[in-house]
Amino acid sequence: MTHANAPLTPAGRLRLVERCQHRPIAHVAAEAGVARQTVTKWVHRYQVLGEAGLVDRSSAPHTSPTQIPKTVVDRIEVLRREHNGRHGRSTSSSSGTVTGSPR
């Protein structure tokens, strides 16, 4: 998320897109310190979606085809709660540390 005075807020992107109507995209991008490809992307989004195309977007993927099924995740959570973090550890009261060195 951008802060209110950042030059590349949706309002700043709109100003860049408007400048591109009268000037080359490469020149506008160089002046703004932004890659030409980025300004081209914003111009295209503005043409297709209007100002809504200039708002910040999530970078999260739309789908995760290799995602673990919900039933498996639920089962893992249940098992973790049942074992209360003791997986692979002894339940005895011994700390298991060596307090002295053998001579």
Image (cartoon, rainbow, N blue to C red):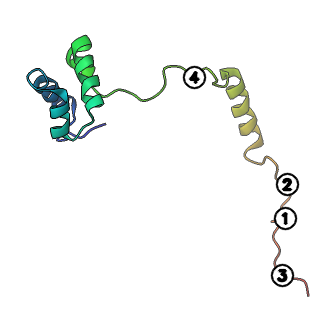
Q: Which residue is mark 4?
A: 64
Q: Quadrant of residue 78?
A: top right
First reached walking from the N terminus: tag 4 or tag 2: 4
Q: Residues within 10 Å of mark 2 (few under 14, many from 20)?
A: few
Mark 4 to mark 2 CA distance (whole Å): 37 Å
Mark 2 to mark 1 CA distance (whole Å): 8 Å
Residue 100 bears which disc, if any?
3
Q: Amino acid at mark 2?
A: Ser
Q: Are marks 4 and 1 in contact (CB under 8 Å)?
A: no
Q: Residues within 10 Å of mark 3 (few under 14, many from 20)?
A: few
Farthest right residue in view = 103
Q: Which residue is mark 1?
A: 94
> Closer to the camera, 82 or 69?
69
Q: Residue at x 10, y 26 (%)?
A: 23
Mark 1 to mark 3 CA distance (whole Å): 15 Å
* Tag 4 secondary structure: loop
Q: Residue at x 83, y 61 (%)?
A: 93
First reached walking from the N terminus: tag 4 or tag 3: 4
Q: Are marks 1 and 3 in contact (CB under 8 Å)?
A: no
Q: Are marks 4 and 3 in contact (CB under 8 Å)?
A: no
Q: Can you tell which of label 4 and label 3 is closer to the viewer?
A: 4
